[in-house]
Amino acid sequence: MTSFPVLMLAASLSMLARGDALAWGESGHSIVAELAQRRLSEKARIAVADLLGDGTSLASISSWADDLRATKPGKKTTRWHFTDIDVKKPDAGHACELDPVEGDCIVAALKREIAVLADRGAGRTARTDALKFVVHLVGDIHQPLHCSERDGDRGGNSLEVTFQGIGPDNKPRTADVNFHKLWDETLIGAHAFSWGAYASELETSVMPGMAAGMLQGEYIAAWANECFQQAVQVYDKLPTGPASNGRILIDETYQAFAQPILDRELVLGGLRLAAVLNDTLAQTPGEAEGK
């Protein structure tokens, strides 16, 4: 498989908007943020409290960026949440060019917002907003359908599926959704009754032995490439024929295949978010000013 081009500056950009793509939904973003919060260093914890206010959790602001882009001023951030690489034509990936209305892509946006967060001279409001973006976008870049598409389906948004799986109560669960929403919300909701319960499960059953890896080189582009590789599998395992209602049938077999990928991406998102915040917020308030 061809590697994701570093910084994704090599090919043409699809200008199709993805305004309806909300990676992980609120539950998934809350899981990533909570896992990260539990791993903040003391200095990062103090800095987060200084920017957000005492008692404000990362989970509580983890979907702020989706709320923002639904507003007129936030439309310029639409493309910040994803980058589409066609799983059937990986050499024809979309470059991270700037659309004058909807912005650029997740690799450029995340790199930029981390830089703002690290800049003690950027101003409190700018750094607080940057923190909110970083929390959200690190989650986004670990959702396989935010790094991919197939035949122009906009990361699965135009691919209709019927989910017939098993819920957390071991009873059948059915939903008609698009493929993107299946990964955003449906699979998570089918696995656990609450995002808090899922996060605790990941802590004990998946996280042991996993590591965030080093924040070296073009690590954000590397995360996007890894996300894309997961997406190749996610699409490859789709059944080939539609169900009787014209939708692709997603059954228990696909659900079982998807679960370890879902677990892994949520955990890596949490670990890597903690690593970014611990690195970026290494100085406590006042230290950079010599106080």
Image (cartoon, helix red, strand yellow):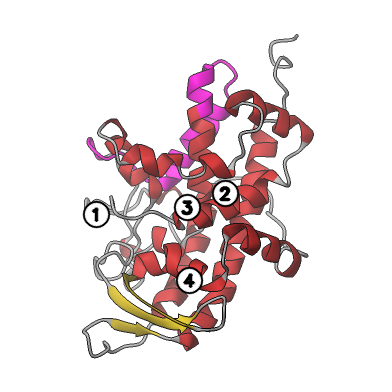
The reply, left or right, for residue 269 in relation to residue 236 is right
Residue on which the image places disc 3: 26
> Residue at 26% across / 81% down in the picture?
247
- Badge 4 or badge 1: first in the primary sequence: 1
- Name the spot of residue 163 as percent of width and height, x first: 38, 79
- Badge 2 or badge 3: first in the primary sequence: 3
Q: How far apart are the two marked residues, 2 and 3, measured between alpha carbons?
A: 25 Å
Instruction: Report the magenta stretch's main SS.
Output: helix
Instruction: Name the element at disc 4.
Output: helix
Q: Which kind of residue does numbered mark 3 sit on?
A: Glu
Give neighbour class at mark 3: few <14, some 14-19, many 20+ (Cα, 10 Å): some
Q: Which mark is residue 230?
A: none
Q: Which kind of residue does numbered mark 1 sit on?
A: Ser
Q: How far apart are the two marked residues, 4 and 1, measured between alpha carbons?
A: 28 Å
Instruction: Name the element at disc 3.
Output: helix
Residue on which the image places disc 2: 219
Residue 90 visible to the viewer: no
Which segment is the magenta one?
Answer: 99-128
Q: Vertical placement of 115 versus 14: above or below?
A: above
Marks 4 and 2 in Cβ contact (< 8 Å): no
- Badge 4 or badge 3: first in the primary sequence: 3
Residue on which the image places disc 1: 14
Q: Which mark is residue 187?
A: 4
> Residue at 56% across / 83% down in the picture?
170
Marks 1 and 3 in Cβ contact (< 8 Å): no
